[in-house]
């Protein structure tokens, strides 16, 4: 049952990623590399939604996964009583404030030519900030669905949201809408995904039970950290990840043309395919690791090793194909020749490390070995920012990728390995 469920999840999430990958490629084919660069920078701004989550989704999901024997969640009550409206109001106020300040930070963050283009997208930036704010507050249904092990349903919602988004993008391109409007549509895909999960929870009047593939819930006397402190640590980690890694398109646009950003975005989409499968396998294993890491035995060690073997091997194999055919695909889609092999080779190393990092981060989050993760990510973020400031100005996007590689190997991997060692031996 567990393997069949995982295969269903992989299939649905793979379809969702395939659909999600097509949208930027359609932008590249119809509007060119400059448009894809602008599109990617705007989507990076939408990444603020992880900050608007306030660190709550993973903590709530872990608590639901551990549960109590025989517990059935009345998900409608859970959604209504979980503080959604105050959370949403706070997010909207913060989003409006960020938008008011956007003209100031755009002029200081980007070179003059890029800043001029972004300054013309004031309406799109406002819409993206609002979408990010609403997305950050609408996490409850997804946490319930994944926390109870219904990952097939969760990834089905992701696929449907991606399919609807692609249909809207295709309609928009046919109607001749601007790149900025297309970016707003794509930025709303995670919100659609979460709304589908909430609607599914509301459609279950008898509540949602634990999936049969899940291991038994923990006994009531197993110690866990307080919800507020763990949520704050998750929020802090998400902010660090956002600044150090998740807004790389913004870093790239600081010292490169929008066309170079578009080429980088194209390769990043290709490498997103193996990373998608890595993400699926990690997400599918997180509820089990949340139980195994607290339930004795090997503390989840065998599950982690199996994930490491499969994820790194898959990423390496797919990455070699991308290095060989990436330039050809770019020319066929964009109509513009470009030798992407040097950058693709460097990104292969970075992507393999991301596969490794994904497994270790999943374990640390599930086991809530958070203080080591907080310290490690703090050092990593500081090092990554300094390295990017130095290397991006000197070497462009290749310097950006090299900064990610060096920062992880030197400053975060040692903390991840120490957290894994401590987590599997407590």
Image (tube, grey):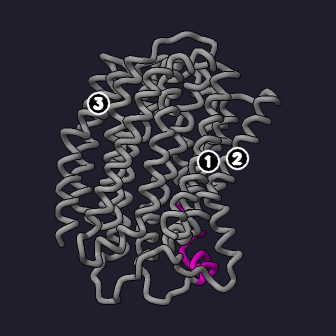
At a point 52% along the width and 40% down the height, the residue shown is 45
Camera-side residue: 134 or 201? 201
Query: Would you place residue 401 above or below residue 101 in this image?
Result: above
Percent position of residue 347, x then y: 38, 29
Camera-side residue: 119 or 307? 307
Q: Quadrant of residue 186?
A: top right
Q: Which residue lies under the disc numbered 2?
A: 163
Figure quadrant of the C terminus = bottom left
**Badge nearest the viewer, 3 or 1:** 1
Within-10-Å neighbours for mark 3: few <14, some 14–19, many 20+: many
At a point 29% along the width and 78% down the height, the residue shown is 295
Q: Which residue lies under the disc numbered 1?
A: 16
Secondary structure beneath label 2: helix
Q: Answer whether residue 89 is visible to the viewer in this image.
A: no
Secondary structure beneath label 3: helix
N-term mark: 1 or 2: 1
The range drawn in magenta is 74-90
Q: Answer whether residue 216 is visible to the viewer in this image.
A: yes
N-term mark: 2 or 3: 2
Camera-side residue: 3 or 405? 3
At a point 70% along the width and 44% down the height, the residue shown is 165
In-image side of 44 versus 241 (left or right): right
Query: Would you place residue 351 above or below residue 282 in this image?
Result: above
N-term mark: 3 or 1: 1
Query: CA gap, disc 2 to disc 3?
Result: 35 Å
Query: CA gap, disc 3 to disc 1?
Result: 30 Å
Q: Is residue 271 magenta?
A: no
Q: Which residue lies under the disc numbered 3?
A: 403
* Disc 1 + disc 2, Cβ < 8 Å: yes
């Amino acid at each position: 049952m567990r393997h069949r469920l995982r295969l269903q999840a992989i299939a649905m999430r793979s379809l969702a990623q395939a659909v999600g990958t097509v949208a930027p490629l359609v932008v590249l084919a119809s509007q060119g590399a400059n448009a894809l660069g602008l599109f990617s920078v705007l989507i990076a701004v939408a990444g603020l939604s992880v900050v608007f989550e306030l660190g709550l989704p993973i903590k709530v999901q872990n608590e639901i996964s551990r549960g109590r024997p025989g517990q059935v969640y009345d998900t409608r009550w859970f959604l209504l009583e979980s503080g959604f409206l105050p959370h949403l109001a706070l997010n909207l106020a913060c989003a409006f404030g960020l938008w008011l300040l956007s003209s100031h930070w755009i002029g200081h963050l980007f070179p003059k030519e890029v800043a001029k283009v972004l300054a013309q997208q004031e309406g799109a930036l406002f819409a993206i900030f609002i979408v990010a704010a609403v997305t950050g507050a609408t996490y409850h249904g997804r946490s319930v669905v994944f926390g109870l092990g219904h990952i097939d349903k969760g990834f089905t919602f992701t696929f449907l949201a991606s399919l609807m988004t692609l249909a809207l993008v295709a309609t928009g391109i046919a109607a001749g809408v601007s790149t900025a409007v297309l970016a707003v549509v794509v930025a709303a895909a995670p919100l659609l995904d979460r709304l589908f999960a909430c609607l599914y929870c509301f459609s279950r009047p008898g509540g949602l039970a634990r999936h049969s593939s899940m291991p038994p819930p923990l006994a009531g006397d197993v110690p866990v950290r307080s919800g507020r402190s763990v949520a704050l640590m998750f929020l802090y980690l998400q902010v660090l990840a956002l600044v150090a890694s998740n807004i790389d398109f913004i870093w790239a646009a600081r010292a490169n043309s929008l066309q170079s950003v578009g080429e980088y975005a194209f390769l990043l989409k290709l490498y997103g395919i193996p990373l998608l499968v890595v993400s699926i396998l990690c997400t599918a294993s997180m509820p089990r690791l949340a139980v195994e890491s607290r339930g004795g035995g090997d503390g989840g060690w065998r599950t982690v090793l199996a994930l490491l073997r499969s994820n790194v091997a898959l990423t390496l194999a797919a990455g070699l194909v991308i290095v060989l055919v990436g330039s050809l695909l770019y020319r066929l889609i964009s109509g513009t020749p470009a030798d992407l092999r040097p950058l693709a080779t460097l990104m292969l190393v970075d992507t393999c490390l991301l596969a490794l990092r994904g497994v270790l981060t999943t374990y640390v989050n599930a086991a809530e070995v958070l203080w080591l993760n907080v310290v490690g990510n703090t050092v990593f973020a500081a090092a990554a920012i300094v390295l990017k400031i130095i290397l991006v100005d000197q070497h462009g996007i290749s310097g950006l990728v090299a900064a990610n590689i060096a920062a992880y190997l030197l400053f975060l991997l040692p903390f991840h390995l120490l957290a894994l060692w401590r987590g599997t031996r407590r």
